[in-house]
Image (spheres, rainbow, N blue to C red):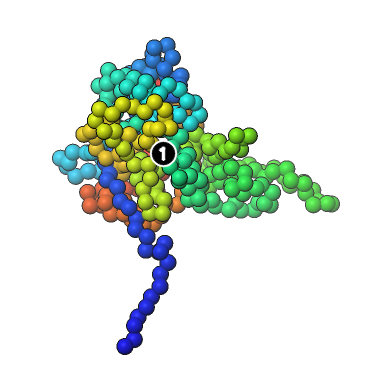
Amino acid sequence: MAVDVRFQEAAAVRRTESVPYSHLSVELGHVYAEDFGDDCRELRRKFERIADWAQAIPALARRGLRPHRQPRISTCFLVDDYFHRFGSPGEVIPQVQDAAAAQGLMLDYVARESTFARHDDVELAQLMLDTLVVEPPRHTTGSRPPLSESGWLSNGKRSPGHAAAPAMTLPLPWSPPAQSGDPRHSIFVDVELWTDEPDGRVWACALLASVWQLTRLGALRHRGDTVAQPYRLPSGEPWPADWDDLPSIVQLNPAAAPFCAYRTVTMMDTRYLPVELAVRTILGQVAVPPAVTEQVAKRASGEGLQLPGELVDRLSYVFIGD
C-alpha cells in the first residue's frame, strides 16, 4: 500500500492566536514625570481638557455598528518609564486614577512604555522594525545607508546627498524630496527610529508609540502568539515597589471591555502631533502577517463592521490645546 507522506515546515502551520476585541480603544493621554510636580496640577488640567472631548466617544464607537448595538469601549493610559523613571506604581497610578475620576473618566488599563521596547524575552521594538517594508527610492545612488544601518525611515524619496560626483562630470543638481503616492504637493517626513549611545541603543518615542498602537489594535504577534496582554492584579495585592516588577499592561477596572480594539482614538496635547505624524509614517509601512489581517477582518465582519484596509486608517486622534 502506498503511503502519502508530506512534510511541511512548522512555521507554515503555526497557529495565530486570537484576542478579544472592543470596538474602540480610547487612550486618555500619556503620563510623564512633569505631570506630577506642583501637587499634580498639570495632571488634573490634562484630564479637565480631555473630559469635554471624551463625551463624544460613544458616538465615535457606534460608527459602523448595526442599529441599537451597544459599542464595547475600553480606555487606557501610558506611563513613560522608558525615558524618565519617576515615583513608583503605587504612587503614580492611584493619582492618575483619582485625577481622571474627578472628571468622570474611568481608566480601564495602564501600560508601561518601556515594555514596548522589550517585553520579557521578546524585543518588540526590533520586531516592529522587522515588519517594515521600505520602498526602495528610485533614481538614487545608494550613497545613503539602508534603514537597518541608518535608523531613519521616510515616507518618500529624499533629496540627494552630497556624494562626490565622478571625475570630469558636473555635480548632480539639487532636487526636492518627494512624498510617495504622487500627491499634488509633497509633505515629506523623515523619522529617526533610534540612536546608538554609549550605554546601548535608545529607541525613539515614535517607534515605541507605533508598537503601542499595534498592540492596541491586536495586530502584534511573535511567532503567532500575542504579546503584552493585560494582567489583573489579585484582589488586595499591593502595587509593586518598582516599575520593572509591574506587568506591561495592567487591568484597573474589573468590568472593563477588552483591551484590544478594531479602532483606536488617542487624546493628547497638540505638542505631540509631530510624534504621531511619525507614528503614522511608520505604521504606513508595516506589513502585518496575512493570517492576523484575515483574522481581524473576519471577526469585524461578523459584527457587521467593515474595517479600512490600511492599518493606519484605523487610528484617530483628538489633539487638545490649552
Q: Look at label 1 and name its amino acid.
A: Trp
Classed neighbour count for the residue bearing mark 1: other residues with Cα under 10 Å, few (<14), some (14–19), many (≥20): many
Whether residue 16 is visible: yes
Q: Under tag 1, what secondary structure? A: helix
Residue at 48% x, 50% y: name it.
Answer: 131
Position of 155 relative to 242 (above/below): below
Residue at 39% x, 26% y: name it.
Answer: 241
Looking at the figure, which quarter contains the N terminus?
bottom left
Question: x and y percent of residue 13 in the render?
Answer: 37, 63
Residue matched to label 1 = 212
Closer to the camera in the image, 181 or 264? 264
Whether residue 320 is visible: no
Question: x and y percent of residue 200 in the render?
Answer: 59, 37
Q: Is 150 left or right of 239, judged from the image as shown? A: right
State the residue lying farthest toward the bottom. 1
Residue at 37% x, 20% y: name it.
Answer: 91
Question: x and y percent of residue 313 in the render?
Answer: 38, 43
Q: Is 83 left or right of 110, judged from the image as shown? A: right
Instruction: Place residue 154 in its image quadrant.
Output: top right
Q: Is 281 left or right of 55, judged from the image as shown? A: right
Q: Is 34 left or right of 24, judged from the image as shown? A: right
Closer to the camera in the image, 292 or 281? 292
State the residue lying farthest toward the top. 38
Closer to the camera in the image, 225 or 100? 225
State the residue lying farthest toward the left. 68
Residue at 21% x, 34% y: name it.
Answer: 255
Looking at the figure, which quarter contains the C terminus?
top left
